[in-house]
Amino acid sequence: MQNVDILALAGLRIDGRRSLDLRSIKHKLAVVKSADGSAYLEQGLNKVIVMVHGPQEPKRKLMEHVTDKCNVVCRITHMPFSGSEWKRRKNVDKRTLEMEHNICQIVEETVLTDTYPRAEISIIVHVLESDGSVLCTIINALCLALMDAGVAMDDMISACSVGLVKKDFCLDVTQLEQNAGGAYIPMVVKSRSDEIVFMQLDSRLSLDKLAEAMEIGAKGCKQMREYLQAAITQERS
């Protein structure tokens, strides 16, 4: 009997986790001295570095109708060896552009942009390795980097994905599970209010199944929130 069959009989996923278990997490703050705030985060096989520059004077002149609040820009770079195959990424990748746009929206919903008028917050993300749910890993690292930079936020955010794997909802799905064809939902939640800042669903789900997925995803975000809070508390002590 193969190891995969043994894990299936035990009700475990292919990496040995139960359905509601997160992958192992490691972090380090202030990894880039030239940035105002930075964080390195490992979540399973995902490895990302997020740098925050600002709030600072914008390099390009802002349009008049957006000068009353802080402008947020984001750039994501993937290492050629970050995925399962070695390949060079195009300068304009639709998926990367979508992630950059989503990150900017999430930051604008979280950061007190009115506190920094006529300023700019620049976010630079380096994806060193990716193995599914990479957007959630980036958001969690970004939360650490924003707090490391001392940027004013109305609440802390945490992110976790939920996916439908063999008719069961699982947290923090890997790339293999994500490619299995089931529903995949990344979620970003505020810590105190439990408000959903971001959620994306590309597959069809019934309302009952969607409600179940959102409830499970919120539990995953809560687990991640507890880790982030402990990480910040540890740095302050």
Image (spheres, rainbow, N blue to C red):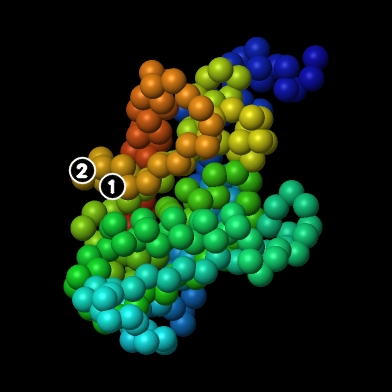
Which x, y percent locates residue 127? Answer: 59, 60
Quarter assignment of residue 2: top right
Q: Mark 1 and 2 residues: CB-CB less than 8 Å, in contact?
A: yes
- Give the class, few, some or many, for how many residues have Cα within 10 Å of label 2's Cα (few <14, many ≥20): few
Q: Secondary structure at mark 1?
A: strand
Residue ID at (42%, 71%): 73
Quarter assignment of residue 139: bottom left
The N terminus: image quadrant? top right
Residue ID at (21%, 76%): 68
Residue ID at (70%, 17%): 6
Q: Secondary structure at mark 2?
A: loop
Q: Alpha-carbon distance for marks 1 and 2?
A: 6 Å
Amino acid type of the residue tagged 1 in the rendering: Lys
Residue ID at (36%, 24%): 211
Q: Is residue 31 visible?
A: no
Q: Is residue 33 above or below residue 136?
A: below
Residue under numbered circle 2: 193
Which x, y percent locates residue 5? Answer: 73, 17
The C terminus: image quadrant? bottom left
Residue under numbered circle 1: 190
